Amino acid sequence: MSSICQTDCAGSAILSTLTFGASMDDTLGAAFIGYSFCCTIFGILTAQVSNYYEQYAVDPLALKIVVGLVWTLETLQVALISHGVYHYTVTLFGSYISILKEHILWSLVTSGFVAAISGSIVKTYFIIRVWRSMYLI
């Protein structure tokens, strides 16, 4: 183990501030808060999807497939973000130099692509509704 990782808590806080320009508590803490918000919104989405399938059983099959596809993509995105947060907060815990040297994790890059696909599907559906003058209210 390197001497950097064997410093006391105060020393590691100073090292992380000098190395990153901000403390690890600020950066990884922000990631954890974002992750918590993401999981909360995903829970709300899951409740809404469940409610949709129960309340609107007569909707067209294509619409049900779109709803299921968006929910599946959002599930994948939460799993990818979970992997990233776990990697940086648990796997690399206390190893500030490893976090600094490491490239962006593959799961976080993939999560961006999944979000883009999901967002594109939702926006395309909205455009179709507006085009057909099927207003929501």
Image: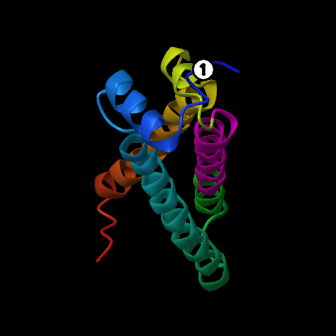
- Between residue 97 and residue 5, name the one nearer to us: 5
Residue most extreme to the bottom: 55
What colour scheme was applied to this rendering of the protein? rainbow
The residue sitting at 39% across, 49% down in the picture is 30
Q: Residue at x 61, y 30 (%)?
A: 6
| Closer to us: 8 or 125 | 8
Q: Which residues are magenta?
A: 71-92
Q: Between residue 24 and residue 45, name the one nearer to us.
A: 24
Considering the whole magenta stretch, tell me its main secondary structure.
Answer: helix
Q: Is residue 84 magenta?
A: yes
Q: Which residue is mark 1?
A: 3
> Which sits in the foreground, 119 or 104?
104
The amino acid on which the numbered mark 1 sits, given as a three-letter code, is Ser
Lateral position of residue 37 relative to residue 86, left or right: left
Mark 1 Cα-neighbour bin, 10 Å: few <14, some 14–19, many ≥20 = few
- Residue located 37% across and 54% down the image: 126
Q: What x and y, as percent, mark residue 120?
A: 44, 40
Q: Secondary structure at mark 1?
A: loop
Q: Whole-percent x and y of residue 121?
A: 48, 44
Q: Would you say 12 lies left or right of 135 here? A: right
The quarter of the displayed image where residue 50 is located: bottom right
Q: Is residue 114 magenta?
A: no
Residue appearing at x 41%, y 38% in the figure: 13
Q: Quadrant of the C terminus?
A: bottom left
